[in-house]
Amino acid sequence: MGKLFAMSLVDIFVIEASLVTPLVQQHTVALPPAPVMLAVIAFGLLCGLPEVLLATPLAVVAIVLVRLLYVEAVLGKKEEAMIHGED
């Protein structure tokens, strides 16, 4: 019975981490779930489990830098910051 409970907890955590969290972040940070999931997988494979905690913040930093340094500076397209609740 204890093994079944532990397995169901692991399943719940995996679903939450791979489905719920990216969808919530998509609406609050305006970050698509695919780059978040790719960052988590890449950091997990390259750096190990402790670095997975830094994957999402570093993905946000990388996307903001790309927008600032490439999209705005090189292409000259200024993107409006998406604020939660405004269209």
Image (cartoon, rainbow, N blue to C red):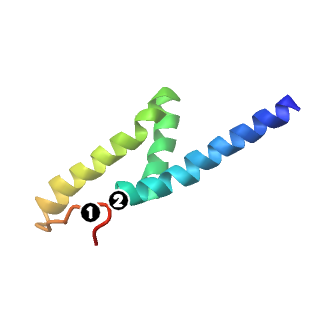
Q: Position of residue 41 (x, y in %)?
A: 51, 43
Give neighbour class at mark 2: few <14, some 14-19, many 20+ (Cα, 10 Å): some
Q: Is residue 34 left or right of residue 72?
A: right
Secondary structure of the residue carrying tag 2 is loop
Is the residue under label 1 in contact with that under label 2 (CB below 8 Å)? yes
Q: Quadrant of the N terminus?
A: top right
Vertical side of 7 occupied by 50: above or below:
above
Q: Identify which amino acid the numbered label 1 is placed on.
A: Met
Question: In the image, what residue occupies the spot 45% across and 34% down?
Answer: 53
State the residue at coordinates (63%, 44%).
14
The amino acid beneath tag 2 is: Ala
Is the residue 32 above or below the residue 38 in the image?
Answer: below
Instruction: Residue 82: name its quadrant.
Output: bottom left
Q: Which residue is mark 2?
A: 30
Q: Is residue 55 left or right of residue 79?
A: right
Q: How many marks?
A: 2
The residue positioned 10% from the left and 66% from the top of the image is: 76
Can you say whether 33 is above or below 57 in the image? below
Q: Of all residues shown, which one is farthest toward the right?
A: 1
Dot 1 crowding, Cα within 10 Å, few <14, some 14–19, many 20+: few
Q: Residue at x 14, y 66 (%)?
A: 78
Query: 61 or 43, which lies in front?
Result: 61
Residue 36: % across, % down: 44, 50
Pick whichever of labels 2 and 1 is earlier in the sequence: 2
Instruction: Tell me where residue 45 appears, x and y as whole percent.
Output: 52, 36
Task: Give the labeled residue for mark 1.
Answer: 82
